[in-house]
Amino acid sequence: MKTIKPNTCSLGYALFLAINAAGVWGGVFPFLPLDMQTPGIMARFFVAQSLVFGLSYLASALGSYFFPGPTRRFLVFAAGTPYFLGWACLIGAMYIDALAAALMTTGGALLGLGSAGFYMLWQRLFAGRDAESGTYDLVVGTAYSAPIYFALYLIPRAVTALLIPLVFLPLFGLCIVICSRKIDLAQPMFEDVPRQHPAVYRRVLQDYWRSALCVGALGFGSGIMRSLAIDEPEIGILVNVMSMAGAFCAAIALLAAWRRKNLRINVVTVYRALFPFVITAFVLLTFLGEGFLALFAGTMYAFYSCGTMLMVAQCAQASRDRGVNPIFIYGFFGGVVYILHDLGFIGDMLAESLTPSALSPLASAGILGMYLLALMYFVGQGGFRQMASAKPLPEKIEFISLSSLHGAPEASCAAQGPDPEKARPGEDEEGGGEEASSGPALAREDAIGASKAAGAPMEDDFLTKTQAQQDQGERKEKRRGDEPQYRDRVSKQCAALQQHYHLTTREAEVMELLARGNSVAFIADELVVSENTIRTHSRRIYAKLAVHKKQELIALVNSFAPESDR
């Protein structure tokens, strides 16, 4: 991949991010005059927009758990209507002075509801595609959003105000409609009924709450900055510029590294690295005052933008790997992150009103930020319970190297390619049908034939089910460790296959368990997912390896030499 090639999906997402950024700070974008952005009006707008935005995520998570049916459809109209009306209210506030406060408040609430709906639609779209193309379009769309946003400055103010609801909104809405038609809604993540698998969803929350809290801590700091900027709307312009520039730089750096090698990013570890700088900045805020505020606010929102990009990627990966409803996991993440943002915003306003007059607003903001960020960091590390028993870190976000692909993902919205024929009674229960995939099958069949001719051991050479159960703890430790830990030759062979055929970590786990002779039910119980999720992973594995049955998979694993033997 020599250039970053956008397509319908990535360009539509880029346009949405650019337009949404124009309203994040309540229209500090040039078409909304600064003289109407009084502290009272902007405070009402921000409270309405941010509260509705965060609560929409929590409501979506609860709704998808108890009423999963509606989440199987891409309801663009349901998100587009409040988004359109919200922008119409902002435009009306420019011309009707007497109703400016009411229109700005109503517009903020409608924009919060509509933008949350569109974020949900985009996340479902990325989750419903294969890992490579879905994540690629997410990152490329984030990179292209910055140039599109800055290009909006070239359009006259009055024209921009009308273009957003009448032209740009229908454009990115149409992109979602076009791309969603290629998504296979029969995937376990869409078909899953959460209440039938409560243990799966409890495990997901246990594994990912720390990641959500870390991104939410950045949102909390950004909320404090939003509160401080109410009295100075010019800061909002700098915040928008720096947040978009930060997202652009992060996306480009990620793509550059992703081209060369596999990446595994742990959100908790990233936050640990940022935490000393963020806490130091809050200390400096109490001493450096107004001159430091604009730079700090812009930097916080730049970090926050990068964190939300990783949040979308992690939620999409969790949906694919665990087979959980994408609206549930993203609603949970977003609810935690954006409610913490609201707490920072509203908490700082209350702190300023309650602190002694001798203490400046910046000093109270710095003290509040330092205390609560440190408290969240302590909770995120496990609190007092962590002293008794250390728990593993949440799973990393995985980026399989783009250099492993034959080229950049196709400039289309196709997600899955040929859908393997579902297993019928009498066929291999883990298989994906008799015709799993095309590709270099002949070379693999030669390897399998050579293995059989040489009398290579088959299923009897692998650990029995009882032994696999005894080694369950060890396997989980290996799965979460930073360095590979091999139990035996089979583990080494599976690791070599993973590298050669570019399998994801979860696909490699399922492949090894299949190769050891385990049933679908046992693997689902081992990995705490549904059986349909394991069958979906099996079909993808068979397609990548160009095998059709478990016996062929076992033979391929058996015939594949570990790297140490080459």
Image (cartoon, grey):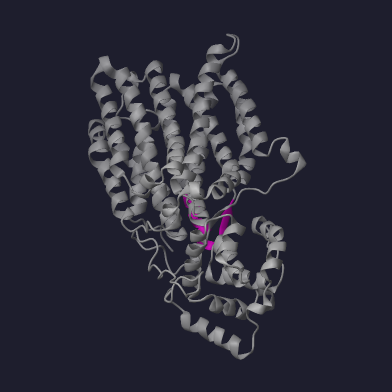
- Is residue 307 placed above or below 516 in the rendered structure? above
Residue 559 occupies quadrant: bottom right
Q: How many marks?
A: 0
Of residues 318 and 498, the one nearer the viewer is 318
What percent of the width, then of the height, locates residue 250? Answer: 50, 47
Residue most extreme to the bottom: 453
Q: In which quarter of the image is residue 550?
A: bottom right
Residue at left offset 40%, top offset 49%:
124
Q: Which of 310 and 494 is in front in this view?
A: 494
The reply to whether residue 294 is in sight is no
Q: Which residue is drawn at 52% across and 54% down?
A: 322
Q: In the figure, 127 relative to 353: above or below? A: below
Would residue 492 be found to the left or right of residue 328 on screen? right
Residue 259 located within the stretch drawn in magenta: yes
- The image position of residue 293, as x and y in percent, is 52, 26
Instruction: Identify which residue is drawn at 64% across, 38% down.
Output: 380
> What residue appears at the point 54 percent right and 26 percent down from the top-left corner?
292
Report the quarter where the N terminus lies. bottom left
Farthest residue toward the top? 357
Can residue 58 be found in the magenta stretch? Answer: no
Quarter in which the C terminus is drawn: bottom right
Residue reaching furthest to the right: 388
Quarter residue 268 falls in: top right
Give the percent coordinates (x, y) of residue 200. 55, 50
**In this picture, residue 118 sits left or right of residue 388:** left
Residue 487 seen in the current view: yes
Drawn side of residue 299 relative to residue 473, left or right: left
Task: Please report the bounds of the magenta region as a residue range.
Answer: 251-265
Q: Nearer the viewer, residue 200 or 490?
A: 200
Q: Residue 562, position in %: x, y?
A: 65, 75
Look at the magenta stretch and give its main secondary structure.
Answer: helix
